[in-house]
Amino acid sequence: MVRKSVEMIHLEAVEIAKCYLGNEFKMVEILGRMHATRGFRDYSKKSLKRYAIECLNLSENVAETMITIVRKSIEVPQLKAAFSRGEIDISKTRRLASVVTRDNCADWIEFARTATLAELDRKIAGSRPFFDVKEVKIVRAKNRIERRFGVSTDLDKRLDRAQDLVSQKLRRPASFEATAEEMVEVFLNRHDPVRKAARAFSRRGGAGVKDGKPVARRVFEDAGENIPAEVIHEVNLRDGGQCTYVEDNGHRCQERRWLDFHHIIPVHRGGPHTAENLTTVCKAHHQLIHHNKN
Ligand SMILES: [Zn+2]
Ligand SMILES: [Zn+2]
């Protein structure tokens, strides 16, 4: 039993929805014309998206959705046609834009008409041989970050296995975060040269690190010979496994990958393998230093 007062609201809502959906399509249409003429450039926008956001005040999400449909509809006009007839809504149309071609569009549109959005997503995912998930980090709170990345089904299985083992160890269901925490600790303890250095120093005196012996693997392009492990540990600990190069603006280089050790006084000029004569630099800065010297 619909109350009289509610029925008024309902009828008005139906009216507004009709306009709203009609306008959604008109918006896609007009963006299509702006795209075809590259008219956004006349308004000093580098892209249709910038134009839609900055000149039309569309939200980024809406702009992206509509422009995706505009672009795909050039190749597959049937997509826009189905959208204009109201057979598929804007969300489904956007999803379909990632899979339809002139040849397969009839089947896809037919499926999308009656499927839920979730069903459509599943079917689209199943039809893809590969999807390159972009790796992103989004700051969600002062000290919480959302990290997104894609994994193969094979890696996914191994991650599940690790999660099982961590749950077993903690005697409660481990979150993926707790699992990553365990995994990364094991990895860092084994491979982080800064941690290794800290360990070597904390057990100093024993542990077989003696002047000059044992020696570490040579990874330094300008080292004439091997550098004692003890010295490497000292440099790693001091420099924190980060490039020490300071830019003109006074900022220290943030690079923690592709690191070399650089001899301040070159070995061929008698520079010793001591911590004082060694510094951690990234590949790019290492090349720069040697370039400037020559
Ligand atoms: Zn060097
Ligand atoms: Zn650097």
Image (spheres, grey):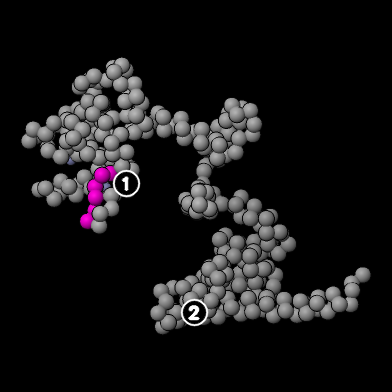
Which quarter of the frame holds ligand 1? top left
Quarter where residue 235 is shown? top left
- Quarter of the picture containing the N terminus is bottom right
Answer whether residue 237 is visible to the viewer in this image: yes
Is the CB atom of the residue marked by disc 1 within 8 angstroms of ligand 2's nearest atom?
A: yes
Q: Above or below — where is 141 with respect to 270?
A: below
Q: Please identify the dominant SS of the magenta region.
A: loop
The x and y percentages for residue 172 are: 64, 31
Task: Look at 67% across and 59% down and name the residue there.
Answer: 117
Horizontal and vertical percent position of residue 153 = 55, 40
Q: Residue at x 20, y 47 (%)?
A: 287
Q: Amino acid at mark 1?
A: Glu
**Can you say whether 233 is above or below 205 in the image?**
below
- In front: 96, or 212? 212
Compared with 267, 91 (above or below) is: below
On residue 255, which mark appears? Answer: 1
Local crowd size for mark 1, using a 10 Å CA cut-off: few (<14), some (14–19), many (≥20): some
Q: Identify the residue under disc 2.
A: 55
Q: Where is residue 70? Give x, y as percent.
A: 54, 72
- The range drawn in magenta is 243-248
* Residue 64, x across and y down, in percent: 53, 68
* Residue ID at (52%, 43%): 151
What amino acid is found at the position of numbered circle 2 in the picture? Answer: Cys
Secondary structure under badge 2? loop
